[in-house]
Image: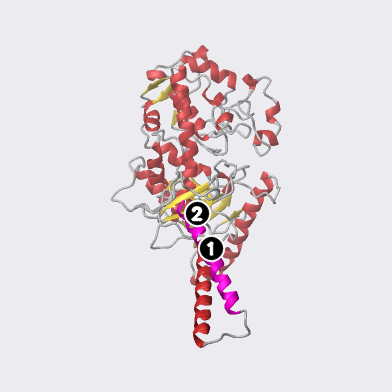
Amino acid sequence: MTSARTANLRSPLIRLLCAWICRTCGGRRPKSKRSLLLLCAACILYGIFIVSQIVNVLPQKPTQKVTATEQPRNFLEPNTFFVENSQPDGGAVNNSPTLQPNVVYITLRSKRSKPANIRGTVKPKKRRKSASLRQNELGHSIFQGIHKMENKIWEGNQKRGTPTYKSRDPNLTIVGDARGGTNKHQSNIRIYSDSAPPWFSPDDIRAMRFLADSRIQTITQVPTSHAHLILFEKPSKKNPTSCQGMCGLVKRPLDMSEVFAFHLDRILGLNRSLPAVSRKFEFAQDVLPCPVILWDSSLSSTDNITQSSVKLKWGTYQKNLPHKCWLNGKAPKADLGCPDVHHHEWSKMALFDFLLQVYTRLDKNCCGFRPRKEDTCVQQGLHLKCDDPHNIDLMHIVQRKHDPRHLVFIKNKGYFDRSEDNLNFKLLEGIKEFPESAVSVLRSQKLREKLLQSFFLDNVFWESQRGRQGIEKLIDVIERRAKILLTYINAHGIKVIPMND
């Protein structure tokens, strides 16, 4: 109302002013100096009036804080991340649309959520090569660097008179003074507190330090499909090709999930997998960090088909589960056909394999889920042989020679890109009990904290996953599967009992 009245008053004044100017300027020139001054003053006032009108038309900055109801239209777009700089933790994500001071607004395009993957395990899209070809490239790249270093070390040792052993076997290379890229004064296993996490034994820490930092003295190739190299710490002069002390098995970068499996195994209290760390070799150029696993010479011998020391088929395995073989130290009847493995070992293995979705042990033909083209069962055509699952062999069922009652989990390659609607529940079939130690960790809501604390010890693995951000994505997958497993336990009435056998 006020603005309308002001406009009505201004309009006649403007007309009168314009008429007076026209009447004054009607002559050729003003009659006196007084008239000339009045004309200039009128022009100045008219100019000020025009400028004030233009300023009122231009937009002005708001002097007050904009609330959610007064928010300008189309100012905030969907998928806008609000990062609060004033928070003590350095920034937190806020989904509120209210504008706040000290806030950085970043608008991103909507992206389809992708499943987590361990870095180094995903093959590049541009390179479409078979798994065997990638294995050969890895072995060739590492051995190529070793051969170059071997010649230099051999010449240097000959001048100094240092004995260096060379094998006549073309697949064997023994290096006398080669390090795997570690600093003498800094270990890749970092422990900043007074002691290591309680789930690691002193033997575990000793093995991890050896695998990550030890001097490489002997290197040989293993004639298997998945293992490439063995690192020997102290070869014997009589038989340099045998592992007399601690040895490490180098595997492909695609098997990096075995390092994750080792830490998860110790945190859950299962203690069935072999120590594993990540290690980068400077003498092998353009090679990603590789998992190095402790070589255990006490493992029982396995056959080439199933790579197991216990030969079992799926049907026999399911029939033996209700018998609870060797439970409470009681020897089973001979007609039951029980293996030497204790009954509780199958429950531990099923829980471990489900969290990591390791299908190669109990379901090598991928009968319990929808496999992809990259899976071994599809590449070998095994997924087409699920009509008679009772005759499918179990794989990688391994014991120790001096301890046949307990299993050793080998080939623990897990898969983090399996969606929740495609999990392999066939791994849990026939299992009626689960270990209390493992289930209590899953229920305690401290699995994430323990995994982060555990992975921080392995510096190479931590950096290979781009630090905490990459590792948290992997932990997210395990936590979601843990919730599904706990729901499965409650729905099926599965018992949770101590398993200290």
Q: Residue at x 53, y 79 (%)?
A: 39
**What colour scheme was applied to this rendering of the protein?**
secondary structure
> Local crowd at mark 2 within 10 Å, few (<14), some, or many (≥20)?
few
Q: Which residues are magenta?
A: 1-25
**Residue 170 visible at all:** no
Q: Amino acid at mark 1?
A: Pro
**Residue 265 horizontal/vertical position (percent):** 43, 37
Q: Is residue 158 above or below residue 296?
A: below
Q: Is residue 472 above or below residue 357?
A: below
Q: Which residue bears the numbered disc 1?
A: 12
| Count of numbered circles in the view | 2
Q: Which residue bears the numbered disc 2?
A: 4
**Residue 220 visible at all:** yes
**Residue 292 horizontal/vertical position (percent):** 50, 48
**Residue 24 horizontal/vertical position (percent):** 57, 78
Q: Is residue 193 left or right of residue 396?
A: left
Instruction: Name the foreground residue: 66 vs 271.
Output: 66
Instruction: Name the foreground residue: 354 vs 480.
Output: 480
> Local crowd at mark 1 within 10 Å, few (<14), some, or many (≥20)?
few
Residue 264 among magenta residues:
no
Q: Amino acid at mark 2?
A: Ala
